[in-house]
Image (cartoon, rainbow, N blue to C red):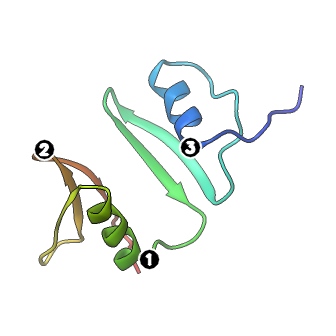
Amino acid sequence: MKKRRGTLLDAISDIFVGKTPIFKPPLGVEKIEKIDSDIVRIQFVDDIDCDLLCKEAIKEGYTVKRGWFTPRIIWDGTIIGWEANLT
């Protein structure tokens, strides 16, 4: 049986419930892995445009913190996203 491409949410949901993903990662996603019980790492094929990511996060209601560290995307005091190799 050939796997079809799912959405990023489909793949993450499968990983969190402990199932082997039934979907191929979406186009542009190289790898999705569960780090621990509440952390998933997503590796994209191409570099991420940091400014675009931060603008979209702010539009969606998230807070973005910047400093000497890479930008952190925050929701209700919890860091929900950051990237070690932003362009």
Q: How far apart are the two marked residues, 1 and 3, measured between alpha carbons?
A: 18 Å
Q: Amino acid at mark 3?
A: Leu
Q: Is residue 85 left or right of residue 46?
A: left
**Residue positioned most to the right:** 1
- Could you say which is closer to the camera, residue 59 or residue 22? 59
- Location of mark 1 (residue): 49
Mark 3, secondary structure of its residue: helix
Counting the numbered discs, the total is 3
Residue 85 at x, y percent in the picture: 38, 72
Q: How far apart are the two marked residues, 2 and 3, measured between alpha carbons?
A: 23 Å
- Location of mark 3 (residue): 8
Q: Is residue 14 left or right of residue 86?
A: right
Quarter assignment of residue 23: top right
Q: Residue at x 19, y 53 (%)?
A: 74
User: Could you classify mark 1 by the number of other residues whose Cα lies within 10 Å: few (under 14), some (14-19), or many (20 or more)?
Assistant: few
Q: Tell whether label 2 touches label 1 (CB within 8 Å).
A: no
Mark 1, secondary structure of its residue: loop
Residue 86's place in the image compared with 40, above or below, is below
Which badge, 1 or 3, is on the more N-terminal residue?
Answer: 3
Q: Residue at x 31, y 69 (%)?
A: 54
Q: Amino acid at mark 1?
A: Asp
Residue 20's place in the image compared with 43, above or below, is above
Residue 11 at x, y percent in the picture: 58, 35
Q: Tell whether label 3 touches label 2 (CB within 8 Å).
A: no
Q: Depth-wise, is mark 1 or mark 2 nearer the camera?
A: 2
- Location of mark 2 (residue): 76
User: Could you classify mark 2 by the number of other residues whose Cα lies within 10 Å: few (under 14), some (14-19), or many (20 or more)?
Assistant: few
Q: Tell whether label 3 touches label 1 (CB within 8 Å).
A: no
